[in-house]
Amino acid sequence: MNGSKINFINGWKSDIQASDEKGKFIYLIAEFGSLKSDPKQGVTIVRKVDYKSGKTITENQFLTPSKHGQIKATDFDAFKIGVTAKDGYKWIFDIFDGYREINSPW
């Protein structure tokens, strides 16, 4: 995904490198924002990146469960990220599973 389709606000990068299922050393990146075609739709892009080459191995898109505007990462706890929408609505985003809890007290 690129900036031609998404208005990115901020992001998160894992502090540690890990070995994926194929034995490659990777790190994870999550980027937060909204769709340009629908600014009320929040979106997160999660990329698995090869540690040595810096090349993206996989890229997945997660849409917020409901439309509350552009989103940004606001809190971090391991692989769970607090996300706040433009209107103040909050979720917790799990880097592996997407949006799980809605309107968390984070």
Image: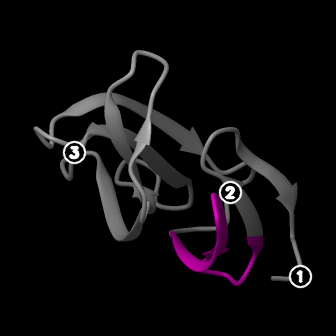
| Front residue of this view, candidates 97 and 4 | 97
Residue at the far left in the pictured view: 53
Residue occupying the point 42% across, 58% down: 16
Using the rendered view, name the quadrant where residue 31 is placed: bottom left
Residue density around tag 3, few if under 14, some if 14–19, many if 20 or more, within 10 Å:
few
Residue density around tag 1, few if under 14, some if 14–19, many if 20 or more, within 10 Å:
few
Left or right: 75 in relation to 45: right
Q: Amino acid at mark 1?
A: Pro
What residue span does the magenta drawing correspond to? 71-90
Q: Looking at the rendering, in which quadrant would you find the C terminus?
A: bottom right
Residue tagged 1: 105
| Residue 39 sits above or below residue 53 on the image | below
> How far separated are the C-alphas under marks 1 and 3?
31 Å
Q: Which mark is residue 93?
A: 2
| Front residue of this view, candidates 14 and 35 | 14
Residue tagged 3: 2
Mark whose residue sits in front, 1 or 3: 1
Residue occupying the point 49% across, 19% down: 21
Q: Amino acid at mark 2?
A: Phe
Residue occupying the point 70% across, 38% down: 97
Q: Are marks 1 and 3 in contact (CB under 8 Å)?
A: no
